Amino acid sequence: MVFAIKIIDRYAGNLICNFISLFNKKKPAAGIKTDKILVIQLWGIGETILTLPAIKALRKKFPDAEINVLATPRNKDVFYKNGDISQVIEVRLNPASILGFIIKNIKKYDLAVDMEEYLNISAIISFFAGRKTVGYSHNSRARLYSNKIRYNDKQHASQTFLDLVMPLGIDYGFDRLPKLNFSKNDRNFVEVFLKENGVRRGDFVVCAAPGAAESAKARMWPYDRYAELCDEIIAKYNAKIVFAGTLDENELIASIQDKMENKGKAINAAGKMTLNQLFCLIGKCNLFIGNDAGPMHIAAAQGVKTLGLFGPNLPVRFGPYGKGNIGLYKGYNCEFSPCINVHRGQVPDCVYQKNSNEYQKCMKNISVDDVLKEVEKMV
C-alpha cells in the first residue's frame, strides 16, 4: 500500500504539478498577512516529530494566529494536545479525502507551509489551500510555491524544517525537541502494563526498538545482535528490557527473545499500545536503543538518553536530537551509504540483493561491542 501511494504520487503527482504550475502567479511570502496558517505533514512519525520546533517557532512569531496542521491517521497523534497548534485536521491519502479537503479549503489560509520533503500531493494541497505557499526548491512541485527553500542535507532535519519558516522573519533556536503528549488514561494503562510485567519503581529500564517502517527494512540492525546486546545489558546493569514496536513486529521481537538467555527480564510491548501510550512508555525508560526509525525520535523528544543505530542514513541528518544522545554510524564500509535520501525520494530497502553477503553491510558493520561502548558512556 505504501509503495503504491508513493508510485502514484511520483508519476501522476508530477504531471499534475507541472500542469498546475502553468497557472501559478503566487509571489514571495515575505510581509504577508498571517492570521491563518496551514502546516502540512503527511507521512512518517519520526519526521513529523522533527517538524515540531518549526511549528513552535511559528507560534512564537504569530501568537494570535490560527495555526492548523494537516496530518494523516498515521501521524496525527504526534500533535496530540500540542499547545502550539489550533487544530489538527485529518486527511487520508486517497483521492476522495484529498479532493474533499481541497474543495472545502480553497484559499482559506493566508499561508500554507509544506513540510513534506518529496511528496507532490502536499504541494498540490498547499497550492489550493494557501494564498501564499512555502516549500522546498527541488523537483517540479517547487513550481507551486511562493517561496522556495533549499533542502540542506548537511544538517539535522529539524533545522531543515525550521528553514522553511525563515522567510517569515523568524529567528528561532532550540536545543531539544518538544515533548510528546498523552492522556491520563494512557499513563494509567502504561503503569499497569509495567507493573503486571514485573517492572518496579527504581528498576533500570532499557527500551529497545529493533524494527523499522516498511519503506526501508535495511535500517534494521541484525536481530540476533539485539538478543546478545540485551543479554549483556541485563547482566551488566541488572536491567529490564522493554521491546517496543508495531503489531507487525511482534514476531520479530519474539524471535529476539527466543535467542536470549535472560528472556525472563525482557518484555514484548509490540502492538500492545497506541502511539500516545508508546510516548508514555518510552518516556518512563532510562535508556533507549533502536534503529533509525520513529521510536528513536520519540525517545529523544521525551528526554530519554537515546542511542540510534545508522547505516543507510546519516545521523547528521536524522540522528536522535538532543544533548548527550548518540547516532552510531559505521556505514563508511559501503560506497553507497547514505543510500537513503528522503528529499530525493530515494528510500531503497538496500542496493544489494537480500540473498547476497553484501545485503545490509553498513548495519552489519556495527558490532555488539560497538553498541556496548556507547551504552557505557551514557549510563
Image: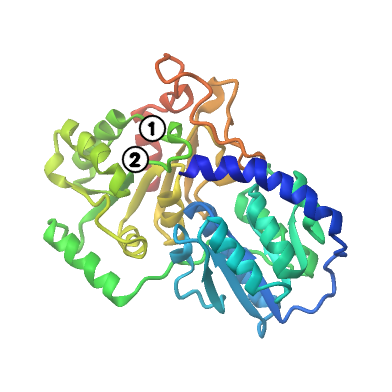
Image spot of residue 279 (x, y percent): 37, 62
Q: Quadrant of residue 85?
A: bottom right
Say which of 303 and 280 sits in front: 280
Dot 1 amino acid type = Trp
Residue farthest to the top, as pictured: 357
Horizontal relation, residue 45 to residue 126: left or right = left
Give the residue at mark 2.
210
Category of crowding for the residue at label 2, using alpha-carbon neighbours closer than 10 angstroms: few (below 14), some (14–19), many (at least 20): many
CB under 8 Å between callouts 1 and 2?
A: yes
| Label 2: which secondary element | loop
Horizontal relation, residue 213 to residue 168: left or right = left
Give the residue at mark 1.
221
User: Image point 36% across, 49% down: which residue?
Assistant: 288
What's the distance in space between the residues labelled 1 and 2, CA to CA? 7 Å
Image spot of residue 98 (x, y percent): 58, 61
- Compared to residue 180, the image places residue 183 above or below, namely below
User: Image point 12% across, 56% down: which residue?
Assistant: 198
